Amino acid sequence: MGLTTKIDGANVFDARHPPSQEIIEKCVHCGFCLPVCPTYVLWGQEMDSPRGRIYLMKLASEGKTAMSPQWVSHFDSCLGCVACMPACPSGVDYGKLIEATRSQIERHHKRSLGEQFHRWLLFETFTKPERLNILRWPLLFYQKSGAQAVLRQSGLLRLLPKSAGAMEALLPEVRKIEEIEEVTAAERGTRRRVGLMLGCVQRTFLSHVNAATVRALAAEGCEVVAPREQPCCGALLVHAGEEERAQKLARKTIDVFEGAHVDTIVTNAAGCGSNVKEYPHLLRDDLGYAERAKRFSACCKDISEILAEMAPQAARKPLQLRVAFLDSCHLQHAQGVRSQPRLLLAQIPGLELLEIPESPICCGSAGIYNLIQPDAANALGDRKAQLIVLLQPDVVVTGNPGCMMQLQTSLARAGRKIPVKHTIELLDASIRGLPVESLL
């Protein structure tokens, strides 16, 4: 394997939440995870599969390998999509293992100055909605002035570092922010009072998704509370091993929504949704928040979950569309939500639902993965785009902002201008009776 062997036999991990030996020992190395692991599908390398990474964790815990750059690279290459978990007959909770390992890496592995700066820049930007809002203005000028089109056509962007080029390629169209009220009244009587998590990138660059979410909830009888002071939920930080910073954001999120006095907390970004449902694990040692985190997470539901469990009260108008539906990894694997978005789409008259092959395999978005591992992310995105193109859909639909941007970029590389929408945008358009052209 080329891994550095330690001679002292000492555990490489510190005592603060190392990867659980109990979970590690549950892995029987059967290989059921291999066909659904994106990096194993791409490269066919054992150490870039879930069972291979678990073996590396075991070696490190036994002091038989060092936390070398090569060892770390196998964990950096993992998307954290957890497609391996529903495929595992032994019930190995790989999600907890990879997050614990990444926290250890960030505490003990010295990254290059370039890596440190890149990660710092991403976290200090993408977890701060107020900074993203400032960034809107130069990006708006970049797009509207024609500079983006000129640079893309010239090929000069290829001279940028891969990470910068990946970020530029993923830029969504900067649109006017669709403002929503802090409290939106329910239509035709209040059936539930819900809180809406606005997200970071979503509230800044995809605000139309939040606006559609509020309209659909209100039309179905929900009073919607969207607290202005809500922070980032910490999902990007958790998945990258930045545990302490994620915990601070989790505490503030809980404080804010406890003060909103809502029945349910609604998420419309799959990555955020899976993260907040794991707050009890993230805050398990915090005596002041452990029980509060359990109550909070028990109230959290994806937008498709809450609407699927409510009998529809708003009429659905026809949308004559061929729709390819992409399961977001953190919706289908981490949250176990698969049937609900399909149910919402099936309620729309005239809509033809198309299933994309290789559903368990990630599109390559995975939080900040497509910004720090652009080659692997592009390969996965291109693979998914080719499968979508074969279906000849009018629209692609998914339930996560990262997936939306990744797919739009991948389809553009394939030379196809197929719009990518959030599931709730189609439901909102159907309820409002908008023309099909508004979605194309």
Image (cartoon, grey):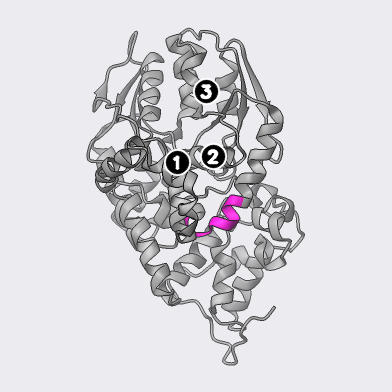
Q: Which mark is residue 331?
A: 2
Quadrant (top left/top right/bottom left/bottom right) for the N terminus: bottom right
Q: Is residue 236 visible?
A: yes
Q: Secondary structure at mark 2?
A: helix
Residue 407, image x, y percentages = 55, 39
Q: Residues within 10 Å of mark 1 (few under 14, many from 20)?
A: many
Residue 351, image x, y percentages = 61, 15
Task: Identify residue type, mark 1.
Answer: Gly
Among the two numbered marks 3 and 2 on one chain, the one whose residue lies closer to the N terminus: 3
Which corner quadrant of the image does residue 276 belong to? top left
Q: How many marks?
A: 3
Residue 200, image x, y percentages = 34, 43
190 lies left or right of 278:
left
Task: Identify residue type, mark 3.
Answer: Ala
| 363 in relation to 394, above or below | below
The residue that label 3 is drawn on is: 308
Do tag 1 and tag 2 residues touch (Cβ < 8 Å)?
A: yes
267 lies left or right of 224:
right
Look at the image and give the residue range highlighted in magenta: 371-378
In reply to whether residue 374 is colored magenta, the answer given is yes
Q: Which mark is residue 284?
A: none
* Cα gap from disc 3 to disc 1, whole angstroms: 16 Å
Task: Identify residue type, mark 2.
Answer: Leu
Q: Secondary structure at mark 1?
A: helix
